[in-house]
Image: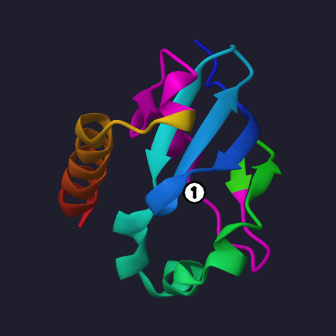
Amino acid sequence: MLRPRAVEVSVQADYCLLITFNNGEKRIFDVKPYFDFAPFAELKATALFNTVKPAGLSIEWAHGQDICPDDLYYNSIPCKSDEYIMHQSDELHLSVAEQSRDYMQEKG
C-alpha cells in the first residue's frame, strides 16, 4: 500500500493540525510532543506555527521543520466528521496527545 500524501493542512486549536491526505482521509495530528526537540521549539510561536503547508509527502513550516510522513499519518487520529473542526472534543484531543506523547517516548 502506498503511503498517503498530505495535500491540505489547517491549523486547529492547541497546536493540532487537521490534515487531508490524497486518499480522502482527514486526520488530526498533535504537534505539541515535538516541542521538546530543539528544531520544533520555535513553533510554539503562533505566527510561525501558522505557516505550516503541505510539502512533498508531508508538511513543513517556514523555517524548514517537517514531520516524517509515517509519523504524520500513523500518529494522527482519523477525523470522521467536520464537527471536530468547529467543536473540538476534549476526549479526542486527549487521545491524540496521549498517543503522540507515547510514540515520542518509545522513539526516544
Left or right: 68 as drawn, with respect to 64:
left
Asked if residue 68 lies left or right of residue 77, the reply is right
Magenta stretch bounds: 60-85
Residue 59, position as x, y percentages in the image: 70, 52
Q: How many badges with numbers are in the image? A: 1
Q: Quadrant of residue 35?
A: bottom left
Going 41% across and 69% down the picture, which residue do you hit? 34
**Residue 38: in magenta span:** no
- For mark 1, does the 10 Å Cα neighbourhood hold few (<14), some (14 to 19), or many (20 or more) residues? some
Q: Secondary structure at mark 1?
A: loop
Q: Position of residue 32 (x, y in %)?
A: 40, 66
Rendering coords of residue 76 (x, y %): 43, 37
Looking at the image, is 108 positioned above or below residue 95?
below
Q: Quadrant of the C terminus?
A: bottom left
Q: Mark 1 = which residue? A: 67
Instruction: Give whichever of 54, 14 is nearer the camera.
Output: 14
Residues 21 and 56: in front is 21
Q: Within the magenta stretch, is there residue 84?
A: yes
Horizontal and vertical percent for residue 27? Answer: 52, 30
**Snapshot colouring:** rainbow
Which residue is at the front of the view, 85 or 61?
A: 85
**Which residue is found at the position 24% from the left and 46% from the top?**
94
Q: Residue at x 59, y 84 (%)?
A: 45
* Figure quadrant of the N terminus: top right
Q: Which amino acid type is marked by label 1?
A: Ile
Left or right of residue 26, residue 7 in this image = right
